[in-house]
Amino acid sequence: MGQKQHPDFYEEIDRLRFTKKYMEMLIQARELDEESFKKSAKESLEGIDLKDSSLSYLNMLTNSSMLQRTEEEIRSLKKIYHKPYFARINYKANDKSDEEILYIGKASLFDRETQDPIIVDWRSPIANLYYDGRLGDVTYEAEGEIYEGNLSLKRQYIIEEEELKAIRDVDLTTTDELLQESLSASSSNRLTDIVSTIQEEQNRIIRADLNKPIIVQGAAGSGKTTIALHRISYFIYTYADYFKPEQLMILAPSNLFIDYISEVLPELGVDRILQMTFSDYVKSCISKKIKLTSPSEKLGKFIDRTYENPEMIQWISSFKGSLDMKIIIDRYLEDILESLIPKKDFYLSKFKLYSAGKMKHLMQKEYTYLPYYRRLEKIKDVLQNYVRTEKKVLLKKVADFYDEKIEKALYSTRLDPDKRKSYVTKAMDKKAELMDDILKQSRVGVQAYIRQIEKYDLIHYFDELFTNKDQLVKYAGDILDQNQIDFFYDYQVNLRKKRQFEVEDLASLLYLQYHLFGIKKELRARNVVIDEAQDYSYFQLYALKSALETDMFTIVGDLAQGIHSYRGLNDWSIVKEDIFPRATYTTLQKSYRTTVEIMHAANDILSLLPLDLPKVEPVVRHGDKPVFHYWNDEIEAVEKIKAEVQRFYSEGMKTIAVIGKTERECVKIEKLFRKHASGELRTQLLRENEEINQEDLIIVHSQLAKGLEFDVVLLFALDELFELSEIELKLLYVSMTRPLHRLMFFGKSPSVFLLEHIRDDSVTIL
Ligand SMILES: Nc1ncnc2c1ncn2[C@@H]1O[C@H](COP(=O)(O)OP(=O)(O)OP(=O)(O)O)[C@@H](O)[C@H]1O
């Protein structure tokens, strides 16, 4: 139904006007004094005649709480002012006689007088009816109670520049036009919120039991990143009284990605959460600057086959992230703990104050909730407390003992005066000496005692295990064969000689840090989202769960995009069964990003992968078929791409990316563009730590493009072709699933993109 013909259109316009005025008044109430506020409120509401009398302006004027606004509320009101709500539901609870009309938006707004909702937050329990409920009999849950009722209307609003543009009533038969419109819009290079179009399957994940971990295997473009962020927002709303945003964390694959999601976070009210890459997180935890080798260089070497012994390098990568590695480190930790347990009884001067046996008990049993070095500190505190209280007792005991002896000697008639004198002097000296010793020992004894225990820093412990062959044999001898130990040892010695670590070492470092020294409070997030989790290893996830002392994780990933599967995961069952046994596992098969035609071609590549994953179902949105363009020389290629790019810009596409297979290839591509197209096209060669320039033609390598999206993707094979191996198929699949609207290939032959393996009708060859 056309918007203007909708019978309620003008009524809805009034409602929007009213809501905006109400918000304006609340905002003004902070800025004006009481008298001028009332005057201005009266004027501004003149002429708005709402049927609902509880919302009358007279009520508002008499309500003094209107004037009491918090900074935070005002901030959120200002944020939603331009689009106060996006939907409405009509709901009648079974136990009430009146139907409620609820407007749903990104924040809530209540009538100060009646407490009736003017806008209901999308995260509130009742708003679930909009996302989940069909018209008719429905239920929703709030604080453990189930409420039953009837949903008679679901209505969507298009509000642009503060004006109501359209209304749509949604029922079972209508397609979700709002979703269609939102998907066909152009990308802005930044992820956006989807509160108005969250789909049922996504809503289920966002609102899944917040007290349980969740693992989501989601197809490319199924909204994993988006819904993970919405789930955080939902969590913060639901547990606002218990958690602060700073206690939540999102672990992202790169800093580029953090920039990519940066716009959606404030929109969802979660901009203050911790956002880091796993590497940066571990670096912060260990408070050390460490040099990491480049994972993309490693991937590049696998692709180029430049490793002499690629199977062994691959084995090392997976071994470092394996359950075996955890077992080895656990054994090693046991010995470290043993080495930190004081072996001798503690004496203050010649008096035994605390036995070694008791300290062992404290270290091994009592203080297990603390990291090892903190246990040692606690022991130090215990000893110091003992010293403090026992010192006086001992001093008195010594004084009494000698005083009694001296007294006896002085009054003894059996001793001749000379002997008595020498006896008394000796006793007084001894007394003084012992008391001095007690006093001195009470100042330095504990420190000296603890100092005897050999202590080291994290890196020492790490190296001591991995670059000492005897240690490797001791802890891993029954797990690895001699050949593996030798290879691993040489590899690690070589790496550490250059003072480097690799990403695969971070799990061990984090795990050791946690057990030995602990994790700073501000880094111990209470709820964590891991995006692109398929690139994490078993041990990495295990170490994270240990370090954070919680299993409250939202883990989202796609095995089909697991380009680091040589070190990452190949299936989720081990994660679910061994690490997060409480987790709910769920899948998302629908892709919202791209068109049917593009997904059709990408699915062909997906089916070549040795993974047991179903085909991705695109949401029905059609576009042009992907196109392959031949080129013979480089200048011709640049010319062709330039022409296409200009055409796409003129068609209104905003973000266009040229994707090359590797970083090295992209460096060459960028040079080529600078040489032959610099006057006409501005390019940006995207690197890990950069922000995307909205206006430029982006040149990005396939690995870095993971997680990002563009209106148009032009896959360009200059020197490097994709081969039929697992890694390269995944890189190709990742690249092909980045566009929202258009996909093109530029190569010397279709086979450079493995197009001979896809169905004839999937790509147009020009
Ligand atoms: N319900 C929805 N309404 C509107 N847009 C949606 C919806 N769900 C997803 N999208 C859009 O689909 C695109 C893909 O989402 P997102 O990047 O979160 O997916 P992903 O699963 O993380 O993808 P990938 O694994 O390929 O990186 C985004 O543009 C997002 O805004």
Image (cartoon, rainbow, N blue to C red):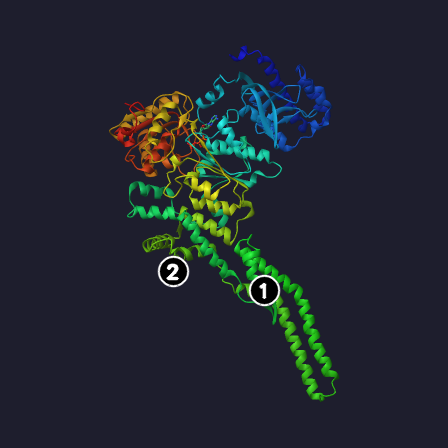
Q: Which of the 4 image quarters holds residue 12?
A: top right
- Pick the front one: 573 or 398: 573
Q: Which residue is mark 1?
A: 446
Q: CA separation, marks 1 and 2?
A: 34 Å
- Place of residue 581 in the rendered image (x, y in percent of width and height, measured from the top left): 49, 41
Q: How many marks?
A: 2
| Residue 747 as seen in the image, left or right of residue 554 | left
Placement of 142 over or under 87, stated as above or below? below
- Whether pointer 1 and pointer 2 mark residues with C-beta atoms closer than 8 Å, the reply is no
Q: Is residue 675 left or right of residue 140?
A: left
Residue 541, percent from left and from top:
46, 44
Q: Which residue position holds label 2?
A: 470
* Mark nearer the N terminus (1 vs 2): 1
Element class at badge 1: helix
Q: Quadrant of ligand 1?
A: top left
Q: In the image, what residue type sits under mark 2?
A: Asp
Q: Is residue 304 above or below residue 413?
A: above
Residue at left offset 56%, top offset 64%: 357
What amino acid is labelled 1 in the image? Val
Indicate which label's residue lies in the foreground, 1 or 2.
2
